[in-house]
Image (tube, rainbow, N blue to C red):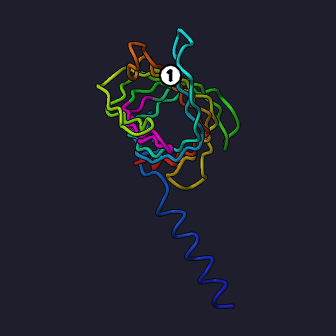
Amino acid sequence: MKLNYASFLTAAILAIATTNARSEMLYDLYAGGSLGLGGISMYSEEDEFDGDDWSARSYGAVLGIDLPVVRFEAEYDYLASSKIDMQTVMGNAYVKFMGEVVANPYIGVGVGAVLDYKYDHDRFDIDTETTIAYQGMLGVTFNLPAMPLKIDLEGRLMYMPEVYEWEHEAIDAMYYDARLKLRFVF
């Protein structure tokens, strides 16, 4: 019996200790990390480039502010596939829809830059300059009761125009993935 009481007391202390101490505030500051699995496609507007598709994965870090209806965040991502490595920095804005207490859907957009892009093409590497990137997100946030953690499940589509030039032709890239994001609220 003493073990049951000790387990219950430990769980209660952890639940109280991890609650958000700033619950009276209208905003939450957060930091987190993400993991995504998807693919990347390369193509040209002239359709002369033989487009390539690869499975890809992403690893990221976010820092943001969560307001009652909107959320803003700065995001860093490392995207990798068998032939491509790239790093991106994005500024994202989300609109949250009122959902259940535990799950809230959202839609978002982002704009930023591809900082470093390496493409292993046959026997040589193509390295590019910084270029702009755009993205759209659709997802749902799960609020963990009595804990300062939020879990986002989202689908994402990122467009990168003219990431490099191949035989005087501008090559665009499209990255898509399903992403899991864990956010810690301060």
- The answer to whether residue 2 is above or below residue 94 is below
Residue 163 lies in the magenta stretch: no
User: Where is residue 67 drawn, in percent x and y?
Assistant: 47, 30
Residue at 45% x, 19% y is 171
User: Where is residue 71 drawn, in percent x and y?
Assistant: 47, 29
Label 1 environment density (alpha carbons within 10 Å; few <14, some 14–19, many ≥20): some
- Using the rendered image of the protein, determine whether residue 118 is visible from the camera's viewpoint: yes
Amino acid found under the numbered disc labelled 1? Tyr
Q: Is residue 23 left or right of residue 115?
A: right
- Residue nearest the viewer, comparing 46 with 131: 46
Tag 1's secondary structure? Answer: strand
- The answer to whether residue 17 is above or below residue 71 is below
Give the residues drawn in magenta, as a range: 72-89
In the rendered image, the quadrant that contains the N terminus is bottom right
User: Where is residue 149 drawn, in percent x and y?
Assistant: 52, 51
Residue at 44% x, 27% y is 92
Q: Main secondary structure of the magenta part?
A: strand
- Residue nearest the viewer, comparing 103 with 32: 32
Question: How many marks can you see?
Answer: 1
- Residue nearest the viewer, comparing 63 with 35: 35
Residue marked by disc 1: 159
Q: Is residue 27 left or right of residue 14?
A: left
Q: Is residue 74 left or right of residue 70?
A: left
User: Where is residue 19 drawn, in percent x and y?
Assistant: 49, 55
Residue at 46% x, 21% y is 134
